[in-house]
Image (tube, rainbow, N blue to C red):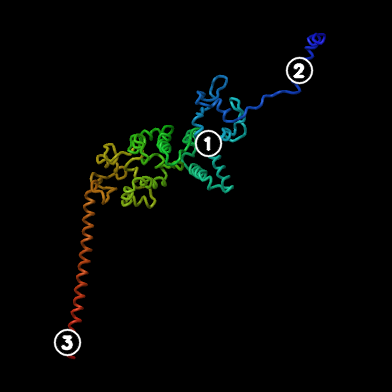
Amino acid sequence: MAAAICLTSPFAVFQAEATAKEIAGSHRITAPPIKLDNATCLTCHDASKGNPGATDVNGKSQSSHGIDNKKLGKIVHSEMQCIACHKDITDAVAPHKKGAGQKADCAACHQELWETAKKENLTKEKERLGVVAKNIEYYKNSFHARPNKEDKTRANAVCDECHHTHTFSIPPLGTSRRSDWHLTVPNVCGEKCHTDELEEYATSVHGKQVLEKHNLKAADCADCHSSHGITTTLKETFKISIAENCGNCHAENLKSYRDTYHGQINKLGYGYTAKCYDCHGSHGILSPKDTESKVHPDNRLNTCQKCHKGATQGFVTFSPHANTSDFERYPQVWIVSRFMWALLAGVFIFFWVHTGLWWYRETMDRKARKSHPDRRKEIK
């Protein structure tokens, strides 16, 4: 009882509080640091839960975009931690304190991985990394890698604008998902940057086949411009290569084009003669039967006059793709070619028959001379 009274006295209480403060001061307890793993990042950045990104005390967004966790689990980088790319993030506080680490850089990361693979002789096992490294080199020399005219601090286009970091995934070859992915190329190029070209392409024969009929064989942006090594269309190399690019699909037309003056000059490495897009257009290519087509009979003269200023109506009778096997489109050429073949065959047949008969007559004459020797020799 006396002990209880002693413990509850004012002095005892004061002494207990002082002891507690002394213990707390000498053994300060701190909260463990928050682990910077994907689960922690997604508490603020998981857009699939209706959270577009971290916000400050005023409710202003601190993140440029949220992340769809469902899509994140299906991409090629799904097993990587966020801070593997965002090396400059050092804490889990919003807004983040940035450290000395490098900001996310797709090209630098992939090149570093490829160099490591080469040092460890794993190039065969990491063959895909080698493909990415080549694409990076193509990109560095491309038009997209050049500084933007309006903002010199950024490039015309960077990896993330075409290959969205948090949703990008290349489906396996031969799968339906790969086909669907391929058909998205025009929209990826056009919706953000090349809107005018996309609008024109959508009305073309190529665009209708890709966007409406989902024809994988029809040309899209990458078929003509490539995917990573995109150059300016003003370059001579691009002008020369465009015929070959078109010829990948239109082999017969390329062959007939090569037989013309335009095609022969182009093949020699000069880009000043007419090429496919000079006559057919570039993004808005239409069927020759379409009245709006640049090569429709009603419009062909205007198209030719862009280069040949003094061209008249008779000038457009020239057929740059005429061939001897298409009677429906080029009946005159087909008839002339058949006549020439018949004439050539007739000449050779006559020659062979004539030679054969001559040889036969000579043979018979020799046999006759052997059976009837020359009597004049005996008289002498």
Alpha carbons under labels 2 and 1: distance apart: 51 Å
Residue drawn at (34%, 34%), measured in percent from left and top?
Answer: 212
Q: Quadrant of residue 210?
A: top left
In this view, the residue in front, 158 or 338, is: 338
* Dot 2 or dot 1, earlier in sequence: 2
How crowded pointer 1 is (Cα within 10 Å; few <14, some 14-19, many 20+) is rated as some
User: Marks 1 and 2: in contact by CB < 8 Å?
Assistant: no
Callout 3: SS? helix
Callout 1: SS? loop
The amino acid pointed to by label 3 is Arg
Residue drawn at (55%, 42%), measured in percent from left and top?
Answer: 111
**Residue position marked by numbered label 2 in the rendering:** 20
Which mark identifies residue 283?
Answer: none
**Residue position marked by numbered label 1 in the rendering:** 77
Residue drawn at (34%, 52%), measured in percent from left and top?
Answer: 264
Callout 2: SS? helix
The amino acid pointed to by label 1 is His
In this view, the residue in front, 115 or 340, is: 115
In this view, the residue in front, 285 or 364, is: 364
How crowded pointer 2 is (Cα within 10 Å; few <14, some 14-19, many 20+) is rated as few
- Image position of 378 (left or right of 51): left
